Amino acid sequence: MRENKLKRQWAAGEKTVNGWLAIPNGFSAEIMAHQGFDSLTIDMQHGVVDYQAAVSMLQAISTTDTVPMVRVPWNEPGVLQKVLDAGAYGVICPMINSRAEAEAFVSACRYPPMGSRSFGPIRATIYGGADYPKHANDEVLTLAMIETKQAMADLDAILEVEGLDGIYVGPADLAISLGVTPGFDPEDKTVVDAIQSIVDTTKRHNKIAGIHCGSTAYIKRMWSIGFDYATLLSEARMMAMKAGELLPELKERTGGAKSSTY
Amino acid sequence: MRENKLKRQWAAGEKTVNGWLAIPNGFSAEIMAHQGFDSLTIDMQHGVVDYQAAVSMLQAISTTDTVPMVRVPWNEPGVLQKVLDAGAYGVICPMINSRAEAEAFVSACRYPPMGSRSFGPIRATIYGGADYPKHANDEVLTLAMIETKQAMADLDAILEVEGLDGIYVGPADLAISLGVTPGFDPEDKTVVDAIQSIVDTTKRHNKIAGIHCGSTAYIKRMWSIGFDYATLLSEARMMAMKAGELLPELKERTGGAKSSTY
Amino acid sequence: MRENKLKRQWAAGEKTVNGWLAIPNGFSAEIMAHQGFDSLTIDMQHGVVDYQAAVSMLQAISTTDTVPMVRVPWNEPGVLQKVLDAGAYGVICPMINSRAEAEAFVSACRYPPMGSRSFGPIRATIYGGADYPKHANDEVLTLAMIETKQAMADLDAILEVEGLDGIYVGPADLAISLGVTPGFDPEDKTVVDAIQSIVDTTKRHNKIAGIHCGSTAYIKRMWSIGFDYATLLSEARMMAMKAGELLPELKERTGGAKSSTY
Amino acid sequence: MRENKLKRQWAAGEKTVNGWLAIPNGFSAEIMAHQGFDSLTIDMQHGVVDYQAAVSMLQAISTTDTVPMVRVPWNEPGVLQKVLDAGAYGVICPMINSRAEAEAFVSACRYPPMGSRSFGPIRATIYGGADYPKHANDEVLTLAMIETKQAMADLDAILEVEGLDGIYVGPADLAISLGVTPGFDPEDKTVVDAIQSIVDTTKRHNKIAGIHCGSTAYIKRMWSIGFDYATLLSEARMMAMKAGELLPELKERTGGAKSSTY
Amino acid sequence: MRENKLKRQWAAGEKTVNGWLAIPNGFSAEIMAHQGFDSLTIDMQHGVVDYQAAVSMLQAISTTDTVPMVRVPWNEPGVLQKVLDAGAYGVICPMINSRAEAEAFVSACRYPPMGSRSFGPIRATIYGGADYPKHANDEVLTLAMIETKQAMADLDAILEVEGLDGIYVGPADLAISLGVTPGFDPEDKTVVDAIQSIVDTTKRHNKIAGIHCGSTAYIKRMWSIGFDYATLLSEARMMAMKAGELLPELKERTGGAKSSTY
Amino acid sequence: MRENKLKRQWAAGEKTVNGWLAIPNGFSAEIMAHQGFDSLTIDMQHGVVDYQAAVSMLQAISTTDTVPMVRVPWNEPGVLQKVLDAGAYGVICPMINSRAEAEAFVSACRYPPMGSRSFGPIRATIYGGADYPKHANDEVLTLAMIETKQAMADLDAILEVEGLDGIYVGPADLAISLGVTPGFDPEDKTVVDAIQSIVDTTKRHNKIAGIHCGSTAYIKRMWSIGFDYATLLSEARMMAMKAGELLPELKERTGGAKSSTY
């Protein structure tokens, strides 16, 4: 089976950068796959991406050695198994708030006896190789989103779930849950402390920790406080940021560019 | 945030007409968006429409000021949040039969602390504006379908759910549940009485009431008995009705048109 | 080979009604295929329809015995042959203004020695049968649009082209070419006389004559002056017409429906 | 309503062959529909197929009298009802491991009072006829996948569920559940015995039994031990098998073909 | 008819910025439409965009007041008329190298008697209004690409073509034609002189001049030498540029980002 | 620039096998790309494949080192340049019947000064590398279909066209042109002699010769008489052939499989 490069990088102590895909298109995905990210995550939760588009995007990523991952819309076995069968080498599952939810998530992603994943890795064997079924439980990443007070309260129990590789912090939802206005790269002490606590707990369990970021500076900071991987913006935001940087210089002559907030 | 025109119309005592979209295509949606409906609902339950097609249709509706809504296939947080993030200004959720189901539905649609909606309004901020997160809980409509005896029995409890804006009657399912043959614009006394009871209870709770209709006459009748909004057929049925009106005059010469029943 | 029902109907002196498809979707096409039209034409010229959508629509029509036809965007061998290979049983080609253009059109649609169509009827044999190649030159309809003064001037020469089955009048373009404002179902004497002249010339050559109409009354009139087939509106227009009939009754209460002109 | 040919065949004691579709495309589906299978199942679980593609494939199958079926991704009412409304004449539901799961599955597929299916058979009436609502509970097949030890333990209770037509054995998952390496056409005694036990129990309940196979020989064997229907490979595998048969003869000259394992 | 804002801006002496779309997707197009460009051009020539995707993108642009334009793949009447019927308010046509080519281009875009455009503005009337047919010849922009030595030699004749609104310089092709290595924002004197000569000639004919640029600095320079409008990069390039700016800072730790050259 | 493996293989005297793709889908393309063909050709002429689907298929092929090629629908510069920009490493152009047609074909595919290809290799640089523009004229294959008597008469002149890499024989069209019934793997002496003559002439010009075949035996025969590459069936036919081989054994019990002729 094609190895999961991320696992090797993390085992070697390397920090990794994850790209993020919200546009439902194979061509934009292919461009991003050639930028040098260690991994790319197709966002089926908040991105504008459905399963069929995600397959095209997985194929586009597969033209390179960037590791393909998917954030599923919800902790639901149908979609978890479909994206794994389509060749995702990692899944990020939103809103894991309890041990039971973590167990359900992991079970859907692991073949028996570890879990209850149904057998049929139709594109996964094309991408991963004929021996995918034998090694999938070891190579495919399961990453639970920790993004509420409730999840923080149950974090040790969540991290004890066998077969769970690690966690992913969603700072916006975490902030809301803590009563703070959501935004990229939080500086609010409540949120920063919560993030620190999550990464500390995760590393104490020897699991992998990642987080969604909005700048390289914040990524470096997150790496320095213990995170193993971090996401840098999204392709949609990069596109809009560059337009937002360049246009005002031209359109102050004609009225100024509109703001963009997504 | 772009205001939800429907809320303003209802607050002013106006009755509104909703159009219905079952064809998974942006062009037919755009044509319908230019007809003058107050709102248009993309039917992901019984319509032939998946999420990715729904996004194209939401964009098509967004070329006008018609309010875009979606009926989701089921009371499932993944799809509820995806259509809201895609910019639906209202969601109709089928088969809400208990207070618990209503609470789950509303929770998925409201940001904390009112609910548990996850943060990431990717297209909603484009359509609604940068301050969408702040006002979404107030502007986005949650409409629970009341279409079974069980739902009628629990209606007061359902209507007490905070954050639920109103209800939507599905007369066909309601008829079946009451043991009556389903059809548009029911005249059966059992069903008519049930409808009257539902609207009365709803208005007693000061919530919004809507219903699916098959004719302008029935809409006017429904408005007169208390409903605030009503759906007029669907674009698919309108197309077939017009063909069914015109063809027989021509094809009685050659054998007669086939009937159409959807 | 599955016979072309239209040819049998016309041979028996029957007049036929053609439906028109402008929405790029298989579901709307399937609904229309069940209405009782003798044939349905997918409009790749002015409709919002590309080749890949047209294939889905041809499949949808093939669920019934309605004869599938395509209007191509232009007199270009690539697209003509693609739609024939995809199983169209008739092609309407716009803007045939000279004998040379008619010859090029017909040549692209007929296998040698009659023409120069390349061999590869990939879906046509699925739809038409294994002996499609042997009979296609006889069964597949080639219909040249006559819609300019120039075409009228060269009409006899156009109709002499071997392998051309007939013509199709585009009244809007014909009107413009004659200096008259375009519109459905022309009453302007210049245009009406031109239409009469075209049908008379066509029937003198024993070829098939068709025309695009906007009402059943005009179709009956066109049949009575010699036309063999006529198109009734389009599915997009039927949908909009029905909405336009029904909505004003409801929305005069709130401001009135917007007009629709496509 | 168009009758469900499979039910008539089985009632007459006939064994049937089911084809399997994993490629999300209407054209490959149409080719397969012309091969002579009694039924074709669109695999939305392990196939690379989403709802919108499935609709195109259902339309393609509807150009023939092959019975259209769908395997849904999961026992979830939203998708079950969507594929039925789209005209599937049978649904195979994965991982039915208990009576409760079987009841939920059947309930979602049957109109009241037998179940809780919501009314709106939008394409089903086009395909099946205007009286579809009256007969759907009788004609539409519900087939529960029996593919775990747990399901075997609860098999009698599962088979007692009213409205369940039969079962479908997934040998790969069954093997895994029994601790055996998964593969087509199992010869391992544990698995073979389990299969025999499942078919025996099913027939004792006078229900229909089917199984997924990888060869004609195994299908004949399964028919002989009591199965009513069996699936033969998939269109994707047939394509790859034929390439795998032919290429080595040519490429031993240049290095040999790569193996393919999906 | 909705006015063409670009024409009003240019008439008022304003310089405009055009955005460029190469990704075949409605969502990326909608994001770009909210950035504040005066116009957006969908690139069907070198972009990865086909007609059906272009329609979705035109709809996405139509959610704002940004002027929608299309660069067609070639000077071919079929596609020119399809994009105009779909509501493009301007077309850029590649490789106009002679007066005859310019005449053919313009003729396809203008209704008689000015040209030979066929009547059927199906989406253009939805976007532009019911009186689109009356004003389209005045409002829709025809822009000929001047990008070869041959075109420069025939430039006066090209600019004399009635109904041609202006030109668009493709610096890469122009450079190649002049024997210079192609690239954004040319500094080679041969190319710079050619560009100056083209804009001077164009303005002498009182026509509109535009050019494709890779930076705001070059756009300002081009405006200063007489150009009326200029394109700033493309959405694909903006996305890649932003990634290329940010990633190296992070991945110098792990090996560095790959270069990107499209 | 990524080298064109076919050119290296042919230079080394190796014969190559080409696969053929007629199904418009990225997943079937990806399966075929893993079978071990030296190259795969997407058939946009007789296949059911449009440009946008072809892009997905090119991406799918790019997950392997199989060389991606496209047969265009017609000798038209727009589509030729679009598929090259999308990363096709070879184009097969149908119906090249004269030197002039060959020159037009080659010119559209070569950058100046060799030809007139417009600059914008948007996906070609992603697939081929940043230096694609410098080497594309050398690496990208131009293959003219020789499939009529007229082409045979002008063959020397066609082969003298600078920049043309070779030819591709379409035996079906060639047979028709010679008055013989078309079919795979012709044995008719007239056709066989014509094929021999074409390959002899081609090799005398030191150009590459290929041909479409229906069996491995015929491919070996064609290699032995001088051809450098040959196509083996198509993915659609392989799928149908395998079904046609297996089903009769099962369905003789129930009536026999339908024949398939595409």
Image: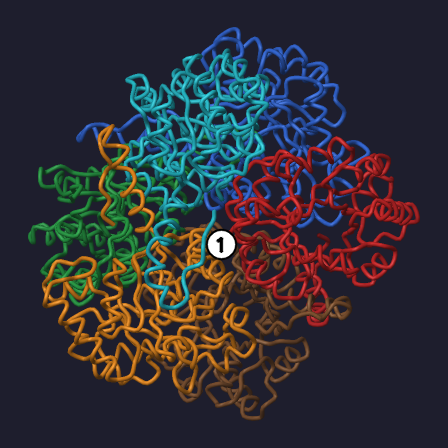
Chain colours: A brown, B orange, C cyan, D green, E red, F blue
Q: Which residue type carries mark 1?
A: Gly
The quarter of the picture where the N terminus of chain D appears is top left
Q: Give the total of numbered labels.
A: 1
Q: Position of residue A262 (x, y in %)?
A: 57, 72
How busy is the neighbourhood of tag 1: few (under 14 within 10 Å), some, or many (20 plus)? many
Disc 1: which residue: A128
Up the image or down, D147 lies above or below E202; here it is below
User: Relative to residue A65, is residue C217 depicted above or below?
Assistant: above
Relative to E44, is E261 above or below? below
Please tell me in which quadrant of the rendered image residue A25 appears.
bottom right
Q: Is residue D251 visible?
A: no
Point out the residue furthest to the top here: F189
Residue E204 vs residue A147: left or right? right
Nearest the viewer among F103 and E255 is F103
Nearest the eye: F99 or E30 = E30
Horizontal side of E191 relative to E103 (left or right) equals right
Residue at 79% x, 63% y: name it. E216
Which secondary structure, mark 1?
Answer: helix
Instruction: Please tell me in which quadrant of the rendered image residue F209 appears.
Output: top right
Residue A92 shows in the view: yes
Q: Is residue C84 left or right of residue D77?
A: right
The reply, left or right, for residue D240 in relation to residue F189 is left
In front of the other: E20 or D151: E20
